[in-house]
Image (spheres, helix red, strand yellow):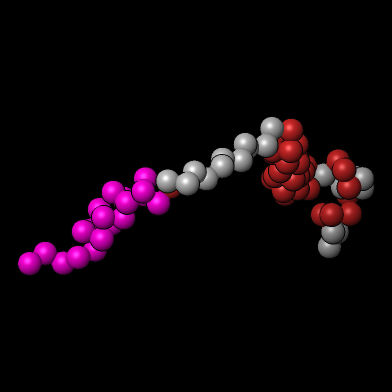
Amino acid sequence: MDDPQANLPELPWWRVRMLWLVLGGPIAVVVASFATLVIALAHPDPVIEARQDSAAAARPAMQARNQAATPQR
């Protein structure tokens, strides 16, 4: 019998559609990650200085956390 693949013309690798379907996702992710890196390096977040009274400001949150963690009587 004849091989059905023997009658097909030989295509270069970049003309195979399945190749681009398989490689398209990872290539898009790499391009997007470099775009994100460029944006992050161009616009860094500002550093927020800690204030001296930060412990006093956190006291109500600590009390609420401790109250929530204590079982009811």
Please tell me whether residue 43 is drawn above or below residue 68 in the rendered image.
above
Quick check: 43 left or right of 8? left
Out of 45 and 26, give the one closest to the viewer.
45
Q: Quadrant of residue 17?
A: top right
Q: Main secondary structure of the magenta part?
A: helix
Out of 10 and 54, give the one closest to the viewer.
54
Out of 22 and 28, give the one closest to the viewer.
28
The image quadrant where one finds the C terminus is bottom left
Number of callouts: 0
Q: Position of residue 55 (x, y in %)?
A: 40, 51
The answer to whether any part of residue 28 appears in the image is: no
Quick check: 41 left or right of 65? right
Q: Position of residue 50 (x, y in %)?
A: 52, 45
Out of 3 and 72, give the one closest to the viewer.
72
Please tell me whether residue 10 is drawn above or below residue 39 in the rendered image.
below
Q: Looking at the image, which residue sits at the far front?
A: 52
Quick check: 19 left or right of 7? left
Q: Residue at x 84, y 62 (%)?
A: 1
> Residue 60 magenta-drawn?
yes
> Residue 17 magenta-drawn?
no
Q: Residue at x 32, y 51 (%)?
A: 59
Q: Position of residue 16 (x, y in %)?
A: 82, 44
Q: Residue at x 21, y 59 (%)?
A: 67
In magenta, the rendered stretch is 55-73
Q: Position of residue 23 (x, y in %)?
A: 75, 48
Q: Looking at the image, which residue sits at the far left?
A: 73
Q: Residue at x 63, y 37 (%)?
A: 45
